[in-house]
Amino acid sequence: MTSLAKVLMVSLCVIYLALQWTSPTFDPESLRGARVLVTGASSGIGEQMAYHYARFGAQVVITARREKVLQQVVEKCLSLGAQKAVYIAADMSTDADPDRVVDFALEELGGLDYLVLNHIGPSYIRMWDGDHEQVQQLMKINFHSYVQMAGRALPFLERTGGALVVVSSVGGRVNTPCVAPYTSTKFALNGFFGSLRHELVMKRSNVSISICTLGLIDTASAMKHVREFTDMPAYPAADAALNIIITGATRQRELFYPWFTQVMALTKDWCPSLSDYMIQKFCKNS
């Protein structure tokens, strides 16, 4: 690594620490009674978010495809202190279910304070073989359903001054080999919701948008597919979930978790050769 690259890395770390020092303070009581819809909540980060919201005394609607697992998550949410916890099984690859889920949450909760979009479709780690159908299917689940749900919920979030929380990935900031369909959906999320944030500000909307960029998280699905591909360290899903919740509750525009994902994103733009080096260091030959 060159001296310039080292100076750049140190500078980025200093900027990150300065931003963290000035971050708004989180008040857990602000979530007591809050009406929350969390997608992709049968396992992993979404499940952990449901438990955190429950501990804060929120009212939670969760959704995913597996009904039996959702039942178990709801039972635990109630035992942890949720004022209300219900579920709706849904498939985000369909045209109807994204709207149906939002309508169900509105009916059950009487309104909405937080829409947390977290679900993802099945993805594979391999070089792209020209399969356009897989890209279309993943884009439907990981991107189009997010846009559809946001559009359905926005008028109701406007009424409450609510928050839209979008869970994205460092894969949507840094080009990574062998996951082209997945990263394309995350780049799309960042582009769309970043633009929408500008539009809401220009319209003087009271709805905030938080885009959460995550690194490798130690969920069962991630560990199953990723470990043969990269040596990058994995971080705890419960901690990632809590950071996402705090970001939404404090209406911050962005979250980078863990911290070095922000360094990776900035390095890609400021020093592409260093970015390439980092990717090649952590990605094994497949």
Image (cartoon, rainbow, N blue to C red):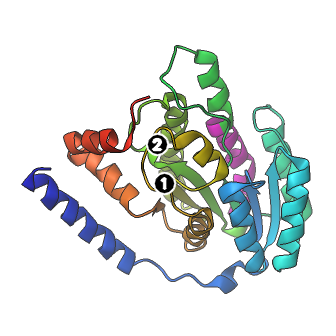
Q: Is residue 113 left or right of residue 61?
A: left
| 257 vs 78: above or below | above
Q: Which residue is at the front of the view, 144 or 126? A: 126
Which mark, residue 162? none
Residue at position x 58%, y 15% from top? 131
Q: Is residue 228 left or right of residue 237?
A: left
| 123 vs 106: above or below | above
What whole-number distance in Å separates the C-alpha atoms at marks 2 and 1?
A: 8 Å
- Residue 39 drawn at (x, y percent): 73, 52
Residue at position x 20%, y 45% from top? 271
Can I make out residue 82 in this image?
Answer: no
**Range covered by the magenta-colored residues:** 142-158
Give the residue type at disc 2. Answer: Gly
229 within the magenta span: no
The quadrant in which residue 189 appears is: top right
| 286 vs 2: above or below | above
Question: Is the residue marked by circle 1 packed among few (<14), some (14-19), or many (20+) residues within 10 Å?
Answer: many
Q: Are marks 2 and 1 in contact (CB under 8 Å)?
A: yes
Q: Which residue is at the front of the view, 40 or 237? A: 237
Residue named by callout 2:
172
- Pick the quarter of the image with the C terminus: top left
Residue named by callout 1:
213
Give the residue type at disc 1. Answer: Thr
